[in-house]
Amino acid sequence: MSTLDEELARAIAEGEAEEAKAGGANGDAGAASDQTSAAQDDGPGGVSKPVSQPRAAPARRNIGLLISLFAIAAVILGLVFTGSDEPGMIYSMDVDQAVQKRDSLADRSVRVQGILVSGTLVKRDSPCEYRFKVAKNGQQLEVHYPQCVVPDTFRDVKDVEVEVTAEGRFTSAGHLQADSIFAKCPSKYEMQQQANAGIQAPHADKPVTIDPTQIQ
């Protein structure tokens, strides 16, 4: 009888031990399941935070880059629209554009390009001054150049188009008071064609010299 009791007690003890092991295993599985569930709650695949952080960083960098580009563009546009007030700024345009904007360009440095109008170039010796007109697209502009020396290519020759660039400021009288002038020679091909036609080179003629009293 005692032997039976001992075997029964041992069987009960073994059963309790197995239940304890099974309970521990289920607890570990539950903890793992809780961790997995928490990871899944964070995002797809259960790895939301580690994955989302690298994705968010490039997005923030792209936004910062766009903001920087917009700021640079705004600065450039500001310089374009306000550059007219900066000292040393020179407007470059053709004669027709200069004539249209003459009033708004008063007291500002301009560079005007056009063709010397034949027959308009005159010179005063004392004090030295050249006066002439340049034209482009049907518009003419009078230029005064109070200097004694001009480029060799700056000559009035019939049937020869001399391209002239004059830099200076508009006066209240409406003409351009030039500080410097440049004249472009025809190309070698054009010069040869003109020579074949019996036309002289631009530097062959001299401007008309007039009496100083004729220029006020």
Image (tube, rainbow, N blue to C red):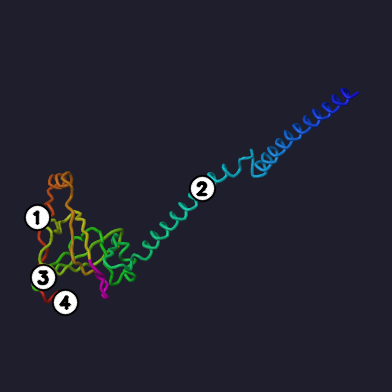
N-term-proximal mark, 1 vs 4: 1
Residue 184: assigned label: none
N-term-proximal mark, 2 vs 1: 2
User: Would you name the residue on which mark 4 appears?
Assistant: 216
Tell me if 192 is positioned left or right of 25 in this view.
Answer: left
Relative vertical location of residue 35 with respect to residue 209 in this rendering, above or below: above
Residue 166 at x, y percent in the picture? 21, 62
Q: Secondary structure at mark 1?
A: helix
Who is closer to the viewer here, 171 or 205? 171
Residue at 64% x, 40% y is 46
Residue at 54% x, 44% y is 55
The amino acid beneath tag 3 is: Cys
Residue 204: assigned label: 1
Image quarter where the N terminus lies is top right
How far apart marks 2 and 3 lie (CA) works out to: 71 Å
Residue at 15% x, 70% y is 146
N-term-proximal mark, 2 vs 3: 2
Secondary structure mainly formed by the magenta segment: loop
Span highlighted in magenta in the image: 168-175
Tell me if 165 is positioned left or right of 4 in this view.
Answer: left
User: Would you name the residue on which mark 3 appears?
Assistant: 128
Q: Depth-wise, is mark 2 or mark 4 nearer the camera?
A: 2
The amino acid beneath tag 1 is: Ala
Image quarter where the C terminus lies is bottom left
Who is closer to the viewer here, 94 or 215? 94
How far apart marks 2 and 1 lie (CA) works out to: 73 Å
